Image (cartoon, grey):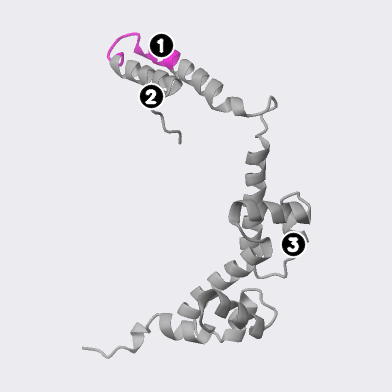
Amino acid sequence: YLLLRSEVPWADEILTDIKKMQLCSGEASAPLQIQGLLYRIWLVLYEQVFRHQTPRGQPEASSLKLHNLRNMIRYIKNNYREKLTLEDIAKVGFLSKSGCLALFKRYLNETPINFLIDYRLKISTQLLRSTGSSVTEIAYLVGFSNASYFTECFRKLYDCTPLEYRKAHAVPDLSRRPAR
């Protein structure tokens, strides 16, 4: 969406044209007037908003970087169970490893591998709360190659072990409640 503020001259022009559309709605020539006003609005939008794109319609570098970052994040979220390397993630963003690191640092203030680990741990908390799977099984399910490293990372992020987390956050089994 685009927020139009009347104190911005070009936005005020659009708001005025929208009011004109509403006022002419009862007239016989309304469809033609509204169409003309819509063309004016599109012209103003194009001149004020879309002018920030290059002549071929390609987004500027910052938009492209954000697009690449979104693709890398999507890749991590879709493939977190697999063994992922910095190189794998960078390839998805069409970047070098250093370019990938710089992009994650700039926009997320962390490395791609730390983002991956944090995402795996987030998924593991859901599994700890909702399943009876062992900590080792959960570690493998979310992409860790061994349970001790999983536990070490978990403790750093959540300040408790996975078992302590499970005890504190487990969803109670409602099927075991006594009948009234």
In magenta segment, residue 159: no
Point out the frontmost of discs 2 and 1: 2
State which quarter of the image contains the C terminus: bottom left
**Mark-to-mark CA distance, 3 and 1:** 57 Å
For label 1, the crowd category at 10 Å Cα-Cα, with few meaning under 14, some 14 to 19 and many 20 or more, is few
- Left or right of 137, for residue 30: left
Residue type for callout 2: Glu
The earlier-in-sequence mark between 2 and 1 is 2
Question: Element at badge 1?
Answer: helix
Q: Residue at x 57, y 85 (%)?
A: 135
* Residue on which disc 1 sits: 32
Verify CB contact (< 8 Å) between mark 2 and mark 1: no
Looking at the rendering, the stretch of residues picked out in magenta corresponds to 24-37
Q: Residue at x 59, y 68 (%)?
A: 118
Above or below for 57 versus 95:
above
Q: How many marks?
A: 3
Instruction: Residue 3: name its quadrant.
Output: top left
- Specify whether residue 91 is in view: no
Verify CB contact (< 8 Å) between mark 3 and mark 1: no
Residue type for callout 3: Leu
The image shows residue 129 at horizontal and vertical percentages of: 46, 78
* Residue on which disc 2 sits: 7
Above or below for 38 versus 140:
above
- Left or right of 91, for residue 177: left
Residue type for callout 1: Leu
- Left or right of 88, for residue 139: left
**Mark-to-mark CA distance, 3 and 2:** 47 Å
Point out the frontmost of discs 3 and 2: 2
Q: Which mark is residue 143?
A: none
Q: Residue furthest left?
A: 180
- Specify whether residue 141 is in view: yes
